Image: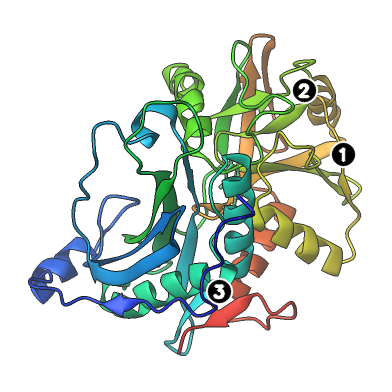
């Protein structure tokens, strides 16, 4: 949709009054132990796109149900993309975002794959920034708390023909989030899906779209039914190479101190946590390789002790140790079965930068004051 009218450089976001924000006492109760994805703030940002007008009618107003025509294309053909990022409170009390311009870029990469219009990166970041500032009182005061931001866009045009829609709606909502795992994050057990894959070459694996998640629900439920926490997917062609979990990237840590993570070949979601950890590991002088790693090799290396740790990473849980892996061919344990040293150190280093308790040499933290 390169021929779409360009948005004005500074898309003004009009502030709509909120007739009835949640009373302070109710809010305090809601954010005391918010969990993840269940509590929502008072406001949302909304921006419309049409073929004729491009991006227009940007508002920050009450969070409320949206009305959609039953023929809205998203409900039939899943033309939808989303992002996930967090606002943190820094040690000095200021609110901050972590690399939000990377989310903006990835959002547009996802939009291109789904034949949707791109939102100027500045408008994306500004929408998120204004929502965080408007709902700052919703920031959970719990240790390790954050405000999870969910920008998303969907085809709102009522039309049942199969082609890219001509009307889209962009929204940002916010959800107070507790600490995924308090101190001493437990290691998770993961199930290798033998029957299902997440993404095929040429498909939408590198795009953050709802359809990828819809397709992962059955294998994820299978993992849970078998007593595991998460599903891990193998590549769709050879069913041999380890790709990622349903919503987190994977790293392997070896006894010689080196790290491996699967390369971005188009079937893996390019995680911003993944990218940040690659930088932090290289800063430490660790050897890091982006290369394919097979399930057979993983089992062999875990058994021989050549591999000592494995971890999953993503915005929601940051870094999570993988303690056990099971599949149709049996199970194996990684290291001690608990979080290893490299996993814990990288997690702490990243969290310290995000929370402003350590220097930020890469300029990743965007203060919002
Ligand atoms: C969002 C996502 C990730 C993690 O990306 P981050 O930018 O680190 O949060 C990994 N895999 C999938 C499939 C995802 O959707």
Q: How is the image coloured?
A: rainbow
The crowd level at tag 2 (other Cα within 10 Å; few <14, some 14-19, many 20+) is: some
- The residue under label 3 is 122
195 or 287: nearer the viewer: 195
Element at badge 3?
A: helix
Location of residue 324 by image quarter: top right
Q: How many marks?
A: 3
137 or 55: nearer the viewer: 55
User: In the picture provided, is 300 more to the left or to the right than 231?
Assistant: right
- The residue under label 2 is 295
Q: At x 42% / y 26%, what residue is drawn?
A: 161
User: Marks 2/3: CA distance?
Assistant: 41 Å
Position of residue 275 measured from the top left corner of the image (x, y, whole percent): 73, 57
- The residue under label 1 is 291
User: In the picture provided, is 163 more to the left or to the right than 41?
Assistant: right
The crowd level at tag 3 (other Cα within 10 Å; few <14, some 14-19, many 20+) is: some
Position of residue 148 measured from the top left corner of the image (x, y, whole percent): 41, 61
Residue 303 shows in this picture: yes
Q: At x 50% / y 53%, what residue is drawn?
A: 83
Element at badge 2?
A: helix
- Decide which of tag 1 and tag 3 comes sooner along the chain: 3
User: Marks 1/3: CA distance?
Assistant: 33 Å
| Picture layout, residue 116 above or below residue 333 | below
Element at badge 1?
A: loop
Q: At x 60% / y 78%, what residue is drawn?
A: 365
Location of residue 179 by image quarter: bottom left
The crowd level at tag 1 (other Cα within 10 Å; few <14, some 14-19, many 20+) is: some
Q: Dividing the image into 4 quarters, which one contains the C terminus?
A: bottom left
345 or 109: nearer the viewer: 109
């Amino acid at each position: 949709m390169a021929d779409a009218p360009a948005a004005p450089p500074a898309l003004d976001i009009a502030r709509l009054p909120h007739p009835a924000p949640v009373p302070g006492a109710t809010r305090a109760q809601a954010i005391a132990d918010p969990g993840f994805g269940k509590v929502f703030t008072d406001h949302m940002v909304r921006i419309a796109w049409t073929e004729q007008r491009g991006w227009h009618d940007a508002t920050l107003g009450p969070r409320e149900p949206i009305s959609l025509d039953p023929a809205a294309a998203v409900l039939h053909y899943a033309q939808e993309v989303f992002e996930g990022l967090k606002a943190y409170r820094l040690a000095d009390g200021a609110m901050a975002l972590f690399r939000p311009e990377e989310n903006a870029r990835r959002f547009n990469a996802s939009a291109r794959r789904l034949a949707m219009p791109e939102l100027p990166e500045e408008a994306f970041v500004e929408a998120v920034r204004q929502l965080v500032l408007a709902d700052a009182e919703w920031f959970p005061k719990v240790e390790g708390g954050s405000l999870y931001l969910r920008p998303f866009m969907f085809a709102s045009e009522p039309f049942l023909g199969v082609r890219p829609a001509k009307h889209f709606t962009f929204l940002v909502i916010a959800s107070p989030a507790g600490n995924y795992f308090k101190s001493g994050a437990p290691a998770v057990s993961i199930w290798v899906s033998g029957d299902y894959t997440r993404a095929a070459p040429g498909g939408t694996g590198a795009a953050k779209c709802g359809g990828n998640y819809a397709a992962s629900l059955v294998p994820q439920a299978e993992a849970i039914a078998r007593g595991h926490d998460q599903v891990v997917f193998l590549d769709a062609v050879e069913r041999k190479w380890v790709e990622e979990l349903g919503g987190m990237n994977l790293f392997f840590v070896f006894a010689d101190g080196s790290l491996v993570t699967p390369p971005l070949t188009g079937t893996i979601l390019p995680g911003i946590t993944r990218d940040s950890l690659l930088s932090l590991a290289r800063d430490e002088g660790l050897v890091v390789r982006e290369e394919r790693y097979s399930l057979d090799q993983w089992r062999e290396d875990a058994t021989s002790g050549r591999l000592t740790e494995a971890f999953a990473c993503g915005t929601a849980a940051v870094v999570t140790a993988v303690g056990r892996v099971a599949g149709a061919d049996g199970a194996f344990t990684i290291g001690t079965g608990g979080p290893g040293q490299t996993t814990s150190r990288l997690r702490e280093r990243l969290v310290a930068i995000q929370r402003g308790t350590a220097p930020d040499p890469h300029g990743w933290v965007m203060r919002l004051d």
